[in-house]
């Protein structure tokens, strides 16, 4: 049997532990691991961060470059998110053309950030209809020990919070060498976070380790932000064929605001 295939014994053991609100590492079913954040880790990026959640570790870098606006949004800057999933981070990732996970991760991150309105893209216009700033977000998982999506969004958001727009020289050429004093136009009210719920039989858990993630039956993810005092669901995606019951979704809806405030407060300690 492959080391990446959990045994039926370990699956049943986890289910029996979740019945008592316990897990292999001592946490409760809805407990997050410890969050550690380092800011400005790259002197080549306009914003960067390293985030660790337990043993899961992700780097995020932000670059800005002038470019043409998209035809359907001539009055807005551009946003592009990419993720580089390599065997360095997990034996599940392979070299070569991107697999499903490498495509899914940046799409979910893009959706959560874009739909939250965190970045005021209209303020990234250099010349209306001609030239705008493009925000490139690059995500580099260093170690995937579970819950990669939620950790990656934290890394993106805190890096964006510290991003500065480069000064422009003649002919709209960016000056990457001179320190800028112009911050990226970020909303102080919206702060998108991602929360993924994994189902094990009849039990739910958050922030799984890689071992737990491999034993789960299905996952559902929500991109959450807060606007005008209200909690907003900006994105959602389910992975896996097993269903969630109405009662389970109602339980998730009750937990989301609590977890948003909890993780938000942890992150603010670093900003």
Image (spheres, rainbow, N blue to C red):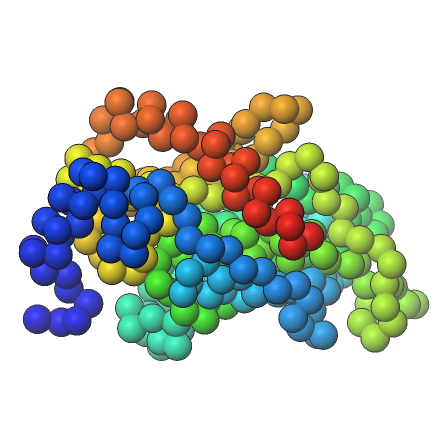
Quarter-of-image position of residue 28? top left
In this rendered view, identify the residue nearer to me: 6 or 126. Answer: 6
- Picture residue at 90% right of the left edge, 67% below the top: 169
In this rendered view, identify the residue nearer to me: 29 or 66. Answer: 29
Query: Which residue of the protein is positioned furthest toward the right in this rendering?
Result: 170
Can residue 131 be seen in this snapshot? no
Numbered circles on residues, count: 0
Quarter-of-image position of residue 249? top left
In the rendered view, tell whether residue 2 sits above or below residue 35.
Answer: below
Q: In the picture provided, is 103 more to the left or to the right than 111?
A: left
In this rendered view, identify the residue nearer to me: 252 or 177. Answer: 252
In the rendered view, tell whether residue 194 sits above or below residue 88.
Answer: above
The quadrant of the rendering that contains the N terminus is bottom left
Q: Position of residue 60 (x, y in %)?
A: 57, 63
Q: Position of residue 98 (x, y in %)?
A: 38, 67
Q: Position of residue 264 (x, y in %)?
A: 57, 42
- Picture residue at 47% right of the left edge, 44% below the top: 194
Q: In the picture provided, is 41 more to the left or to the right than 102?
A: right
- Picture residue at 83% right of the left edge, 52% below the top: 126
Can residue 197 be seen in this snapshot? yes
In the rendered view, tell whether residue 141 sits above or below residue 77.
Answer: below
In the rendered view, tell whether residue 162 sits above or below residue 175.
Answer: above
- Picture residue at 13% right of the left edge, 44% below the top: 16
Q: In the picture provided, is 208 more to the left or to the right than 181?
A: left
Q: In the picture provided, is 242 more to the left or to the right than 166?
A: left
Quarter-of-image position of residue 134? bottom right
In this rendered view, identify the residue nearer to me: 13 or 199. Answer: 13
């Amino acid at each position: 049997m492959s080391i990446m295939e959990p045994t039926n014994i370990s699956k049943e053991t986890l289910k029996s532990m979740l019945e008592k609100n316990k897990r292999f590492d001592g946490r409760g079913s809805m407990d997050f691991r410890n969050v550690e954040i380092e800011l400005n880790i790259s002197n080549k990026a306009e914003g960067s961060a390293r985030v660790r959640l337990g043993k899961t570790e992700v780097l995020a870098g932000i670059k800005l470059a002038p470019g043409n606006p998209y035809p359907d949004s001539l009055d807005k800057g551009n946003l592009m998110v990419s993720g580089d999933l390599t065997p360095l981070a997990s034996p599940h990732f392979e070299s070569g053309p991107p697999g499903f996970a490498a495509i899914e991760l940046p799409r979910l991150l893009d959706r959560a950030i874009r739909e939250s309105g965190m970045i005021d893209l209209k303020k990234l216009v250099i010349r209306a209809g001609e030239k705008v700033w493009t925000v490139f977000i690059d995500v580099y998982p260093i170690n995937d020990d579970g819950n990669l999506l939620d950790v990656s969004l934290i890394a993106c958001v805190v890096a964006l919070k510290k991003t500065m727009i480069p000064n422009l020289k003649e002919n709209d050429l960016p000056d990457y060498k001179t320190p800028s004093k112009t911050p990226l136009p970020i909303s102080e009210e919206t702060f998108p976070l991602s929360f993924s719920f994994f189902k094990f039989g009849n039990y739910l858990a958050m922030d799984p380790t890689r071992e737990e993630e491999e034993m789960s039956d299905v996952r559902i993810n929500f991109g959450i932000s807060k606007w005008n005092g209200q909690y907003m669901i900006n994105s959602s995606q389910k992975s896996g064929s097993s269903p969630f019951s109405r009662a389970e979704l109602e339980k998730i809806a009750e937990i989301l605001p609590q977890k948003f405030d909890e993780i938000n407060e942890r992150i603010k300690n670093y900003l």
